[in-house]
Amino acid sequence: MADIPAPPFAFEQNLDGTQDAVRGALAVFLDRLAPLPLSDDELGVIELVMAETLNNIVEHAFRDHPQPGLIRIRCQYHSNNLHLRITDLGDAMPNSVLPQPKGFDIDVAVEDLPEGGFGWGLIRALTGDVSYARSGPMNITTMRVPVGSA
């Protein structure tokens, strides 16, 4: 097993709030995690959580903005947890709270499954300590992804 980097392992990453920027930023983000002893499954979870979170920001927080906004990610690893803080200057969450996971009947044919609406349920299921706050014009989403315990 690779040596775990000495604490604190941390970095920040900025990206434009566009779909194209999200795709490129995800690859860079995962590359920056290379020094950590993470399994392919853990990297898959991290990629899914980040993709869902960043795409929600692009699709909803920046929906009515004429120019894409800036998204900032702060990542820290310690005690077998990846701590993420994602900020943007987009529109606030409705009622300034994280959406509650929607209940869906998944015992139906694939073509009858609803499109969309699974993102925050997935994020909540795959992470811990998810929170959202609005500070002035800034959205602040934080979460913890348990990793590296294998």
Image (spheres, grey):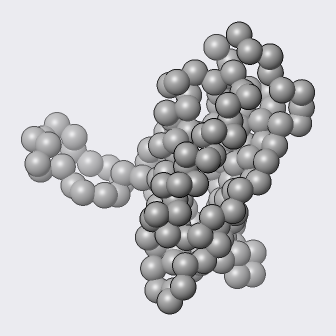
Image spot of residue 21 (x, y percent): 53, 63
| Relative to 54, residue 129 above or below | above
Q: Residue at 54% across / 85% down in the picture?
A: 67
Q: x%, y% of residue 101?
A: 42, 52
Q: Quadrant of the N terminus?
A: top right
What residue is rendered at 75% in x and 81% in y? 136
Front residue of this view, candidates 48 and 92: 48
Q: Residue furthest top?
A: 1
Q: Position of residue 43 (x, y in %)?
A: 55, 32
Q: Is residue 7 above or below residue 59?
A: above
| Residue, far bottom | 66
The part of the image, by quadrant, that contains residue 114 is bottom left
Residues 24 and 91: in front is 24
Q: Quadrant of residue 7?
A: top right
Q: Locate residue 64, reporting x and y percent.
A: 46, 86
Residue 95 visible in the displayed image: no
Res. 119 in view: yes
* Front-lying residue, 22 or 94: 22
Question: Quick check: 59 above or below 77?
Answer: below
Looking at the image, which residue is at 69% across and 62% down? Answer: 14
Horizontal side, residue 136 vs residue 114: left or right: right
Total marks drawn? 0
Quarter where residue 4 is shown: top right
Quarter of the image where the C terminus is located: top right
Q: Is residue 141 above or below residue 39?
A: below
Residue under the point 81% across and 43% down: 10
